[in-house]
Image (cartoon, grey):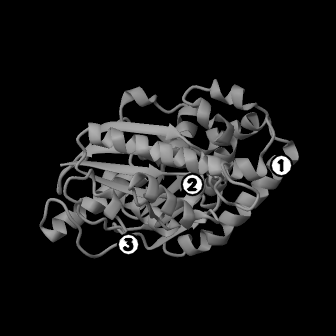
């Protein structure tokens, strides 16, 4: 069947279309995304602005039209930290549903970490042993670790690249004192949870997911995206540490000229690098293998598991995260208006 995942993130709204069925690898069929940067469309009180809501509604509507054009049978729509933490988040969700018929399910930070961990586990397999997974999004940093498909520990910290850039690194290039304060803040936040993760045992395999990590790896010499998802890519801490002071002295325009860095993400790259460097240092990691699968693939895999458990081709059963979208309503793409 053809599934779609509609991910309303802090940076982008991304529709991923895959051909999938239980027991098989999901095969990407189409990708549609718009850089919305909701994390930066907040007012002084932490509410998504009227312009942000308008743009979100327009983008979700466009994505659903694409899903229909591509023959998607079922759409799994969700939102992450930008909507989850906005003071008017519930009102925004109601407005989106009223205007588009799409009921976005808001994932908790812990669910984000658990689903991303599932995707990394399935990609690298059981031979990875105890797996430690780091994911830097626009609004948050997710960390999960464990030997199974469900991690022993899964945490989310407010250390997304977009959030930090908007709140703490406003200059272009940023003021050196702002960079120092941000570095201290990031390290203090991560240090609080290092013990909770490390006490469960040293990881056998350390993995990074997300666009931020992919761009940092490319910046430090990893293979281009054109080499395909099966080409191994690694981020080495020593190489990242050499880049951080250089990034701090660059403008966003300068960063956008670095191979592998997109113009839309260039402004956030320094914040992402500070988080990655801090996490690798505090967890004692010399390198991270970059995983091409992340949260969206985790959502798809969990849905396929649910379908297999229920013995149906389109529908939900019980268990796991509170992430089980109902079966699509007759005559609708994905039954989005029925999602709860």
Q: Is residue 28 visible?
A: no
Q: Which residue, given by chain and number where applicable, does mark 2 sit on? A: 285
Res. 306 image quadrant: bottom left
Mark 2 closeness class: few <14, some 14–19, many ≥20 residues within 10 Å: some
Per the rendering, the mark at residue 178 is 1
Q: What is the CA distance from the residue labelled 2 to the residue labelled 1?
A: 26 Å
Q: Which residue, given by chain and number where applicable, does mark 3 sit on? A: 322
Q: Residue furthest left?
A: 311
Q: Nearer the viewer, residue 89 or 256?
A: 89
Task: Tell me the SS state at disc 3.
Answer: loop
Say whether residue 203 is left or right of residue 165. Answer: left
Q: What is the CA distance from the residue labelled 1 to the residue labelled 3?
A: 39 Å
Q: Nearer the viewer, residue 63 or 37?
A: 63
Mark 1 closeness class: few <14, some 14–19, many ≥20 residues within 10 Å: some
Q: Residue drawn 54% across and 29% down? A: 260
Q: Is residue 45 above or below residue 332?
A: below
Residues marked 2 and 3 touching at CB (< 8 Å): no
Q: Residue drawn 42% across and 45% down? A: 61
Q: Nearer the viewer, mark 2 or mark 3?
A: 3
Answer with mark 1 or mark 3, whichever residue precedes in sequence: 1
Q: Residue furthest front?
A: 98
How many numbered circles are shown? 3
Res. 325 image quadrant: bottom left
């Amino acid at each position: 069947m053809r599934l779609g995942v509609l991910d309303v993130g802090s940076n982008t709204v991304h529709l991923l279309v895959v051909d999938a069925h239980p027991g098989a690898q999901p095969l990407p069929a189409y990708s549609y995304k718009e850089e919305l940067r909701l994390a930066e469309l907040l007012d002084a009180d932490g509410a998504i602005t009227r312009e942000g809501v308008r743009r979100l509604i327009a983008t979700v509507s466009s994505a659903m039209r694409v899903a229909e054009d591509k023959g998607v049978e079922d759409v799994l729509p969700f939102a992450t930290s930008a909507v989850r933490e906005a003071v008017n988040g519930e009102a925004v969700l109601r407005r989106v549903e009223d205007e588009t018929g799409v009921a976005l399910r808001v994932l908790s930070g812990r669910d984000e970490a658990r689903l991303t961990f599932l995707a990394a586990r399935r990609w690298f397999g059981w031979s990875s042993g105890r797996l430690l997974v780091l994911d830097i999004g626009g609004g948050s940093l997710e960390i999960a670790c464990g030997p199974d498909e469900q991690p022993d520990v899964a945490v989310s910290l407010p250390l997304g690249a977009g959030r930090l850039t908007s709140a703490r690194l406003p200059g272009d290039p940023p003021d050196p004192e702002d960079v120092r304060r941000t570095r201290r803040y990031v390290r203090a936040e991560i240090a609080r949870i290092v013990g909770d993760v490390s006490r469960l045992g040293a990881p056998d395999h350390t993995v990074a997911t997300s666009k931020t990590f992919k761009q940092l790896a490319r910046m430090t010499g990893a293979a281009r995206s054109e080499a395909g998802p099966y080409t191994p890519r690694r981020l080495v801490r020593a190489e990242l540490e050499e880049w951080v002071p250089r990034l701090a002295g660059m403008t966003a325009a300068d960063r956008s000229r670095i191979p592998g860095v997109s113009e839309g993400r260039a402004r956030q790259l320094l914040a992402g690098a500070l988080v990655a460097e801090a996490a690798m240092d505090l967890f004692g990691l010399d390198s991270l293998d970059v995983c091409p699968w992340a949260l969206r693939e985790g959502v798809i895999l969990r849905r396929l598991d649910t379908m297999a458990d229920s013995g149906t081709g389109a529908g939900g059963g019980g268990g796991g995260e509170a992430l089980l979208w109902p079966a699509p309503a007759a005559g609708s793409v994905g039954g989005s208006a029925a999602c709860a």
